[in-house]
Image: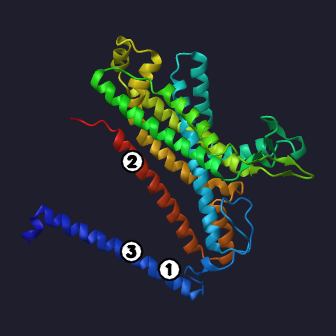
């Protein structure tokens, strides 16, 4: 009885009993489920992943045929989910940052337009927005022969999607890509140098013009170093459809556009709240030092605002990844549509397929969260 009077001992005993109760509950649920499955003669296990799928997939970033296995279907769905999530995160971040800054503009019209954008698209359910862009906008586009064309008839958009020039990977493409990587590394090094110089001397160095110059000039140099041969495959109008080029489906366009428009509203509000959280004294101090409004925003306000905005922005990235599962509403072949949908209907092993799909979203979300938490930790103010 003396041990029970010890607070640490009591806490340990209660925690141990709680863990035992949870494990016992999960064990009961698991054994009860397995018993019911055996009584009904339902097949279990993951052997179905090696069986032939037998159905086609319209949009696949990796090679796929009807004779491939359900595991290949899983890879196709996973690839499409990751692609739409990454594209959505990139463009939602850019749009959200722009709208968040415009929301605080001193120009009345610009501020009200940004506010109206946020109020409208944030309060309309995402599923309705996906259906709107797909059925009302993209499906209402003209037919193939009446396509809208852009850039000297190199890009076309119609009710079958966006048709654009395609390219094959060769020495020129590799050289251009390497040039972008070199430019990115150079900008990072220059930015670190400029920050160190400013801390030591107080003199600010404008890196933006240099960075833009590197991002433009180095790829041009890489283009000529690689042989100046892009080998572009331009789309040509055939008898019934375009031949050549690359087609981006209306399903992908509608889903990505809706995800970007919707998520950007929340990111914009996170940016706005971060900017407003920066004290007025900081802004007044930057003005007293003779900084312009742009310099004050870039050097004083945004660095502090972004630190505040990162945590809520992480949540919006995770929501975007999970919201991509709404692709099933318009038939975009993500992991939910073709794996938890078509494959599940064929093999009937709901527990395994749903468990795999849930694990995928959990792992992807944890991975995105881990990366952004690392960035958040790097940007956190270090106290001395």
Which residue position holds label 3? 25
Q: Which mark is residue 33?
A: 1
* Scheme of colours in the image: rainbow
Residue 118 shows up from this direction: yes
156 horizontally vs 13: left or right:
right
Residue 308 showing in the rendered view: no
Mark 1 burial class by Cα count in 10 Å: few <14, some 14-19, many 20+ = few
Q: Earlier in the sequence, mark 1 or mark 3?
A: 3
Task: Identify which residue, 189 or 63, lies in the foreground.
Answer: 189
Q: On the picture, is 67 further left or further right than 110?
A: right
Point 44% across, 20% down: residue: 295
Q: Residue at x 40, y 78 (%)?
A: 27
Toward which corner of the image does residue 185 lie, by quadrant?
Answer: top left
Q: Nearer the viewer, residue 299 or 372?
A: 299
248 left or right of 361 in image: right
Q: Mark 3, residues whose alpha carbon is within 10 Å: few (<14), some, or many (≥20)?
A: few
Location of the C terminus (image quadrant): top left
Judged from the image, the secondary structure of the residue bearing numbered disc 1 is helix
**C-alpha gap between disc 2 and disc 1:** 38 Å
Q: Tag on residue 220?
A: none
Against 122, is 107 above or below? above
Which corner quadrant holds the N terminus? Answer: bottom left
User: Quick check: 95 above or below 334?
Assistant: above
Disc 2 target residue: 373
Q: Estimate the x, y position of residue 156 in percent, counting from the top left.
A: 80, 42
Q: In x, y percent, where is residue 352?
A: 55, 74
Query: In terms of image quadrants, where is residue 137?
Result: top right
């Amino acid at each position: 009885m003396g041990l029970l009077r010890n607070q640490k001992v009591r806490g340990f005993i209660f925690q141990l009993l709680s863990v035992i109760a949870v494990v016992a509950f999960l064990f009961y649920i698991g054994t009860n489920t397995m018993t019911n499955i055996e009584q009904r003669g339902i097949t279990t296990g993951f052997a179905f992943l090696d069986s032939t799928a037998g159905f086609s997939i319209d949009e696949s970033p990796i090679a796929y045929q009807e004779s491939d296995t359900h595991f290949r279907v899983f890879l196709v769905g996973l690839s499409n989910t990751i692609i739409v999530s990454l594209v959505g995160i990139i463009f939602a971040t850019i749009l959200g940052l722009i709208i968040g800054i415009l929301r605080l503009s001193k120009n009345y019209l610009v501020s009200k337009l940004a506010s109206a954008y946020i109020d409208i698209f944030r309060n309309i359910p995402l599923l309705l927005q996906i259906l709107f862009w797909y059925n009302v906008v993209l499906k209402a586009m003209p037919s193939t022969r009446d396509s809208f064309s852009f850039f000297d008839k190199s890009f076309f958009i119609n009710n079958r999607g966006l048709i654009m020039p395609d390219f094959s990977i060769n020495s020129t493409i590799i050289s251009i890509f390497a040039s972008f990587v070199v430019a990115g590394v150079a900008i990072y090094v220059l930015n670190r140098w400029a920050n160190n110089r400013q801390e030591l001397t107080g003199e600010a160095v404008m890196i933006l013009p240099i960075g833009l110059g590197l991002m433009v000039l180095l790829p041009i140099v890489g283009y000529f170093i690689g042989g100046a041969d892009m080998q572009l495959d331009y789309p040509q109008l055939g008898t019934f459809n375009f031949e050549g080029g690359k087609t981006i489906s209306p399903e992908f366009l509608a889903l990505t556009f809706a995800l970007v428009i919707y998520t950007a509203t929340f990111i914009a509000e996170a940016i706005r709240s971060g900017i407003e959280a920066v004290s007025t004294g900081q802004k007044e101090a930057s003005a007293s030092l003779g900084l312009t409004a742009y310099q004050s925003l870039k050097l004083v306000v945004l660095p502090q605002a972004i630190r505040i905005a990162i945590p809520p922005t992480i949540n919006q990235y995770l929501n975007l990844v999970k919201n991509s599962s709404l692709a099933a509403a318009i038939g975009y072949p993500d992991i939910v549509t073709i794996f938890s949908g078509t494959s599940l209907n064929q093999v009937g092993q709901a527990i395994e397929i749903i468990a795999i799909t849930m694990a995928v979203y959990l792992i992807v979300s944890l991975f995105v969260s881990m990366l952004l938490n690392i960035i958040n930790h790097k940007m956190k103010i270090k106290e001395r």
